[in-house]
Image (cartoon, helix red, strand yellow):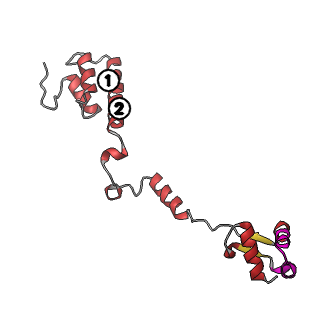
Amino acid sequence: MMENKAKKTASGILKVGKTKIWVNPEERQRVLEAMTKEDIRLLIKDGIIRKRKDSLHSRARARVLKEKKRRGRKKGRGKRTGRKTARTAKKEKWMKNVRAQRRAFAEMKKTGMKFARPASEIYLMIKGGYFKGKKHLQSVAEGKAEGKGVKSK
């Protein structure tokens, strides 16, 4: 059987295209002697005719990009799409802030600091998102500064 005819038959057996079929050039004579589909099956079994591996899409550039992003590069304002809340949910942001402020407040209570307001009130203010951050919480709790237009009692 001619080599191109053998390739066509093998492609039907292996369920791939003709270009995916590889024929061992050293065993070309055995391929030419093959007459039937059964002969081609035997050649496939012997490894004379094989299916070529699929050429995969290279991930090299993707890996490099991922490494750069892991290091904090390529994440600037120009690369961001969608809303701010698409990257971090509002609730997650709130939880992060509140937990940090509650930890800071508990630490202040441990040190025996005197507060300008009752602790329960400050706790509720934390829950309500009153404070910008831990420093703001500390200054308001000590009575040094008031923020957001609320006067101390």
Q: Position of residue 41 (x, y in %)?
A: 82, 68
Most frequent secondary structure within the magenta stretch: helix
Residue 115 in the image: state x and y as whole percent: 23, 18
Q: Secondary structure at mark 1?
A: helix
Using the image, tell me which numbered label, if any, was put on residue 105. Answer: 1
Q: Secondary structure at mark 2?
A: helix
Res 9 quadrant in image: bottom right
Can you see residue 57? yes
Highlighted range, magenta = 25-42
**Could you tell me residue 123's position as x and y percent?**
28, 21
- The residue beneath circle 2 is 95
Residue lying at the far front in this picture: please name it.
Answer: 36
Mark 1 or mark 2: which is in front? 2
Looking at the picture, which amino acid does disc 1 mark? Answer: Phe
Q: Residues within 10 Å of mark 2 (few under 14, many from 20)?
A: few
Q: Residue at x 79, y 72 (%)?
A: 49
Q: Do the CB atoms of the residues marked 1 and 2 lie less than 8 Å apart? A: no
Real-space Cα separation, disc 1 to disc 2, in angstroms:
15 Å
Say which residue appears at 28% left-offset and 26% top-offset: 127
Q: Is residue 4 located in the magenta-colored stretch of the structure?
A: no
Q: Quadrant of the N terminus?
A: bottom right
Q: Is residue 3 left or right of residue 20?
A: right
Question: Which residue shows up at 49% across the image and 56% down it?
Answer: 66
Q: Quadrant of residue 13?
A: bottom right
